[in-house]
Amino acid sequence: MLRRLTVLTILISAMDLIYFAIVWNIRNWLIVDVMHKHIVDQDRLLILWVCVTQAFLPREILQAALSALKCLRSMAWLIGLSARCPCR
């Protein structure tokens, strides 16, 4: 099961990176023309956004799998460990 979850995580991460590449190519049109916004540092915002999504994707997939298997105690540990701030 862990192997399947790993493959699923890799596939969804790859799809997320493809989505990011599309958004990166049309970022100016999307932000200025569609959303009618002016974001000073839109490149940094998009890069940080993809970093956050790539960092939390494995946690979300494991959390969904544990929830589906009704392993709530393991899920509680996973959530507790991922919520711990390493910057303290």
Image: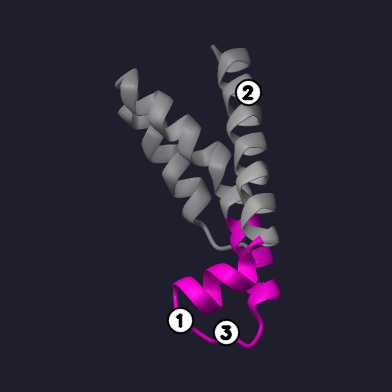
Measured from the top left, where is residue 88 in percent x and y? 60, 71
For discs 3 and 2, the disc positioned in front in the rendered view: 3
The crowd level at tag 1 (other Cα within 10 Å; few <14, some 14-19, many 20+) is few
Q: Is residue 74 left or right of residue 30?
A: left
Q: Is residue 74 left or right of residue 43?
A: left
For discs 3 and 1, the disc positioned in front in the rendered view: 1
Residue named by callout 1: 36
Residue 23, image quadrant: bottom right
Per the rendered image, the range of residues in magenta is 26-52
Residue 70, image quadrant: top left
Q: Secondary structure at mark 1?
A: loop
Q: Is residue 42 magenta?
A: yes
Residue named by callout 3: 39
Examine the rendered structure and indicate whether residue 35 appears above or below residue 52: below
Tag 1: amino acid: His
Q: Is residue 22 magenta?
A: no
For discs 1 and 2, the disc positioned in front in the rendered view: 1
Q: Is residue 88 visible?
A: no
The crowd level at tag 3 (other Cα within 10 Å; few <14, some 14-19, many 20+) is few
Measured from the top left, where is residue 40 in percent x and y? 63, 88
* Residue at 54 percent of width and 11 percent of height: 1
Residue named by callout 2: 6
Tag 3: amino acid: Ile
| Residue 7: image tag | none
Instruction: Look at the numbered discs 3 and 1 and tell me whether their residues touch, using CB distance below 8 Å.
Output: no
Tag 2: amino acid: Thr
Q: Is residue 45 visible?
A: yes
Measured from the top left, where is residue 50 in percent x and y? 63, 56
Q: Is residue 43 left or right of residue 33?
A: right
